[in-house]
Image (cartoon, rainbow, N blue to C red):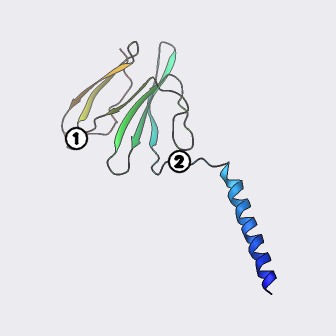
Amino acid sequence: MRPQINHLRAISIFIFLCVIASCGDQTTECPLTIEQTSIIDQKEFKGVTYYLVERISGWHEKTIIIQLFDKKPEFDKCNENVSTPIIDDSVSMDLEVKSFLINLESKQYEIEYGGDYESAKQTSKFKLNFK
């Protein structure tokens, strides 16, 4: 009986290793917290369609990141950028956004804040306006 148990154990270990090896190359390990991404606005300007993307990063204390792309953004399964943004920066969401203006030549943006924390509306006021 003893040789039979060792034989079963060896087969079980072999099957287990085959399963692990078959999964290893097909999966990409993502960070513990995956950023939430969404396209919040798009607009055509001078023949180019621009896309404004909001990224929410963090576990408890969230960081809002705004990205501007000059083509439809692509993300991998971990929500990391496949394409490169023109603008990529975190923004303060402690105050309500009154206006958001992008200068494409300098690849910079201007945000006018107002109100207080209670009136902050996430990025709902982030609409593409070009200078």
Q: Residues within 10 Å of mark 1 (few under 14, many from 20)?
A: few
Kind of residue indicated by mark 1: Ser
Describe residue 4's horizontal placement relative to residue 51 as left or right: right
Q: Are marks 1 and 2 in contact (CB under 8 Å)?
A: no
The C terminus: image quadrant: top left
Residue at 78% x, 70% y is 11
Q: Position of residue 54 (x, y in %)?
A: 41, 36
Kind of residue indicated by mark 2: Cys
Report which residue position mark 2 lands on: 30
Q: Judging from the image, what secondary structure is the residue with disc 2 in?
A: loop
Residue at 63% x, 49% y is 27
Residue 36 is tagged as none
The N terminus: image quadrant: bottom right
Q: CA distance from mark 1 to mark 2?
A: 34 Å
Describe residue 70's horizontal placement relative to residue 2 as left or right: left
Describe residue 113's horizontal placement relative to residue 64 as left or right: left
Report which residue position mark 1 lands on: 119
Query: Can you tell which quarter of the image residue 106 is in?
Result: top left
80 up-or-down from 69: above or below: below
Q: Position of residue 78 (x, y in %)?
A: 53, 44
Q: Judging from the image, what secondary structure is the residue with disc 1 in?
A: helix
Residue at 51% x, 14% y is 47
Q: Position of residue 117 (x, y in %)?
A: 21, 41
Q: Mark 1 or mark 2, which has the lower sequence index?
A: 2
Q: Residues within 10 Å of mark 2 (few under 14, many from 20)?
A: few
Residue placed most toward the observer, 99 or 37: 37
Query: Can you tell which quarter of the image residue 56 is in?
Result: top left
Q: Nearer the viewer, mark 1 or mark 2?
A: 2
